[in-house]
Amino acid sequence: MEREVRDQQRRLALFYRLASQTDDALFIIDSVEGRVTECNHSARAWLGVWPFVEGTDPAIPSVFQSFDQWKAFLDEAATKGSARFEWDVKSADGSSAVCEILARLVNEQGVAYVVAVGRDITSRVETERDLMDQTQRDGLTGILNRRAFDAALVELWESSAQTTTPLALLMMDVDHFKAYNDTLGHPAGDECLRAVSGAIGRMIRYPGLRVFRYGGEEFVGLLPVTDVGAARNAAEDLRRTVEGLGLAHPASPTSNRVTISTGVASRIPNLDDDPADLLAAADEALYRAKFEGRNRVATALPF
């Protein structure tokens, strides 16, 4: 029994030594009293965690901004069996990091403890953001893709409805693009799309403008807090910008340069309405712009 006790003490001492050297912050909380009972060096160093001392009030980790925030974290762990807390850390040099604490409820001999691990997840978050960005970028032009547009339309529709401000949608199409491809070849067509998307994406006069590749030679723009008149002016600027690129289009019956046609629609959204109606209205206006001769802007009828 003495050997067994000595062996347990040796293993426990080894565990504490190793736990003190890890970069992860480890600490244990008595969930009933809300006080830290054990913690390692990393928990002290960057979470401000200190074990409870008899005769004093339980100290909360300094990373939590208030006792209410700390209590909410413990209550979630106690009621759900686990909890997660994430925050941004700003360094003196201006750099930032993203950190998290994961906690799990553990019962030991009738006492409920919360076992918590804190770690720097900046690298993981940046990787996830990069992957998310890749899924929302068009591979050819590098601008946002149809998937990103679908999400942005719903997001801006809801926010515009809540603020009762107009949301404008611009549907753009490169005129006679099939003829361009047939005459100059697909590599030239790809360069044309990159040039057009780059030009309309750099319209710094409209900082709220979000431009997406909708598919093929079609692009779509979203302009929050923009009525139909201002949206038409923006569309005219975009049309002139593309025409000003001076990209030769020898097969176009409209112009000897690459041009675009644009349909414009704007309305103050209602949460009960479908945002697809705004897209449909702009698409119908685009059809009229093409029918009327292309290289022009048409606005949607009231809807």
Image (cartoon, helix red, strand yellow):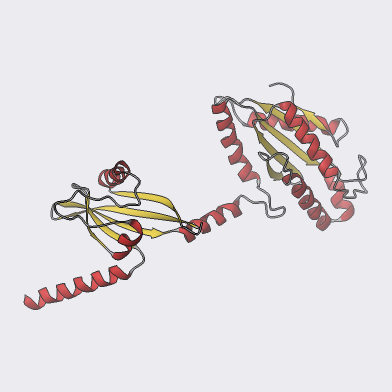
Residue 44 picture quarter: bottom left
Residue 41 picture quarter: bottom left
Q: Residue furthest top?
A: 302
Residue 273 image offset from top left, x and y in percent: 58, 25
Q: Is residue 103 left or right of residue 241?
A: left
Of 131 and 160, nearer the camera is 160
Quarter the N terminus occupies: bottom left
Query: Please, is residue 76 above or below residue 115 in the view?
Result: above
Q: Is residue 260 visible?
A: no
Quarter the C terminus occupies: top right
Residue 154 image offset from top left, x and y in percent: 58, 35
Q: Is residue 209 left or right of residue 73?
A: right
Q: Residue furthest left?
A: 1
Of 276 and 170, nearer the camera is 170
Residue 40 image offset from top left, x and y in percent: 28, 64
Q: Is residue 267 left or right of residue 203?
A: left
Q: Residue at x 31, y 56 (%)?
A: 48
Query: Please, is residue 135 above or below residue 225 in the view?
Result: below
Q: Is residue 219 visible?
A: yes
Q: Residue furthest front?
A: 92
Residue 59 image offset from top left, x and y in percent: 24, 50
Q: How many marks?
A: 0
Of 23 and 109, nearer the camera is 23
Query: Please, is residue 229 above or below residue 92 in the view?
Result: above
